């Protein structure tokens, strides 16, 4: 029988400062999120068109202890009730990661608690076990403003990257599209709303890298195609509401096609390795997109596979996933004190070739 563990998680690797307390029971029902606090920084970076690392780091340092206090208060616990502290130690914007690790070190030392460093991407990749109790192995698509990759998840520390974006992440492409069409940020929800009224067939957008084998993807060319299409319309007058809707619908359909097509390949690649996935799971802000979800749901239905999309608050950056990944690592026997050196880059799959590019949200691992 596994013993109960109560862990404080701390996350500060991008533009959300977060703290959470997760308790993992001894039964098969898994874990309970006792509290999860997320303080975003959207308004601090709004004027700059992207996350400014120095501003992010300062804001993390100012907010992190308040978030921890709030999380413990909401959970009705004190540090004395915890079994361990888990903190994101990479990959991410280094100033923010350092703010989190330093705070966690102080807390753990003061309270005499074991401290464990967690890979932010492992937090995302292990979330379906927290929310849905998935068994290993499963296939995971991380798809957000900073990440896009397919992972076979075989254990708390066993990840195989099958492919990923070689340039922009899809969320970045949605955000740039919104900017080009004078829609508000973050661009994903705005583009999705416009796309509902649009004709996805009016503009011919490319399906990058679909003509090549493998699971790698590319999204930066889509934004160039969108710019050309927009300028083509504007040569003949102003951009009307209907034009904007058609551009959004065409762009979104291209992203959905690529993600669905490459997901089918990733599933085939996993099976070709002799592994039977227990499910196909997604995480990241772009997983909120209903058109993309519908395509992935249909793909899984056709494959006779469960499709798992954790609730959005656990798909986007949060600290419950860090606390949970800490619990998984402790249970797997990882020594306390492991992985506490802050790292800007930290690929989950150390054996895979490095991915190209680093987006506005920091290094992609
Ligand atoms: O995972 P996330 O909250 O943060 C990080 O990237 O770290 O993802 C944010 C990204 C943004 O680029 C946003 O535009 C995109 O997810 N996003 C969406 C939607 N909602 C958020 N993209 C497409 N459709 C959506 N409904
Ligand atoms: Zn993330």
Image (cartoon, rainbow, N blue to C red):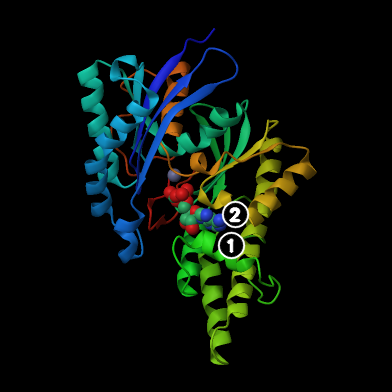
Give the number of marks.
2
**Nearest the eye: 237 or 33:** 33
Quarter assignment of residue 72: top left
* Residue on which the image places disc 2: 289
* Mark 2: secondary structure: loop
Disc 2 C-beta below 8 A from ligand 1: yes
Percent position of residue 160, x then y:
55, 36
Height in image: 67 above or below 198? Answer: above
Sequence order check: which comes first, mark 1 or mark 2?
Answer: 1
Percent position of residue 338, x then y:
33, 24
Percent position of residue 59, x then y:
25, 47
Height in image: 224 above or below 67? Answer: below
| CA–CA distance in space, label 1 to label 2 | 7 Å
What residue is rendered at 62% in x and 78% in y? 242
What residue is rendered at 66% in x and 70% in y? 197
* Residue on which the image places disc 1: 192
Q: Quadrant of the C terminus?
A: top left
Disc 1 C-beta below 8 A from ligand 1: yes
Can residue 125 be seen in the rendering of this structure? Answer: yes
Q: Report the image quarter containing ligand 2.
A: top left
Percent position of residue 129, x then y:
56, 28
Asked if labels 2 and 1 touch by Cβ distance under 8 angstroms, the answer is yes
**Nearest the eye: 332 or 162:** 332
What residue is rendered at 32% in x and 44% in y? 344
Q: Quadrant of the N terminus?
A: top right
Height in image: 143 above or below 115? Answer: below
């Amino acid at each position: 029988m596994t013993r109960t563990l109560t862990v404080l998680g701390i996350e500060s690797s991008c533009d959300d400062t977060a703290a959470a307390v997760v308790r993992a029971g001894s039964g098969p029902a898994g874990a309970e999120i006792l509290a999860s606090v997320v303080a975003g920084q959207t308004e601090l970076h709004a004027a700059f068109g992207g996350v400014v690392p120095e501003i992010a780091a300062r804001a993390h340092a100012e907010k992190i202890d308040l978030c921890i206090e709030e999380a413990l208060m909401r959970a009705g616990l004190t540090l004395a009730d915890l079994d361990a502290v888990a903190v994101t130690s990479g990959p991410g914007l280094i100033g923010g990661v350092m703010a989190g690790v330093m705070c966690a070190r102080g807390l753990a030392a003061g309270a005499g608690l074991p401290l464990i460093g967690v890979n932010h991407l492992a937090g995302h990749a292990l979330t379906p076990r927290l929310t849905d109790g998935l068994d290993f192995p499963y296939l995971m698509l991380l798809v957000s403003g900073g990440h896009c990759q397919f992972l076979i998840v075989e254990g708390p520390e066993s990840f195989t990257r099958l492919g990923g974006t070689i340039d922009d992440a899809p969320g970045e492409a949605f955000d740039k599209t919104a900017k080009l069409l004078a829609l508000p940020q973050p661009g994903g929800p705005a583009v999705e709303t416009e796309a509902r009224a649009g004709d996805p067939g009016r503009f011919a957008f490319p399906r990058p890298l679909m003509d090549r084998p493998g699971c790698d993807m590319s999204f930066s060319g889509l934004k160039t195609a969108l710019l050309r299409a927009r300028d083509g319309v504007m040569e003949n007058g102003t951009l009307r509401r209907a034009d904007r809707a058609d551009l959004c619908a065409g762009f979104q359909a291209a992203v959905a096609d690529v993600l669905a097509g490459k997901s089918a390949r990733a599933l085939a690649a996993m099976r070709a390795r002799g592994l039977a996935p227990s499910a196909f799971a997604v995480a990241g802000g772009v997983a909120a997109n209903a058109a993309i979800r519908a395509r992935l749901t249909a793909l899984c239905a056709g494959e006779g596979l469960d499709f798992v999309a954790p609730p959005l608050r656990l798909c986007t950056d949060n600290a419950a996933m860090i606390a949970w990944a800490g619990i998984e690592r402790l249970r797997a026997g990882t020594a306390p004190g492991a992985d506490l050196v802050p790292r800007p880059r930290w690929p989950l799959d150390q054996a895979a070739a490095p991915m190209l590019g680093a987006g506005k949200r920091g290094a992609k691992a």
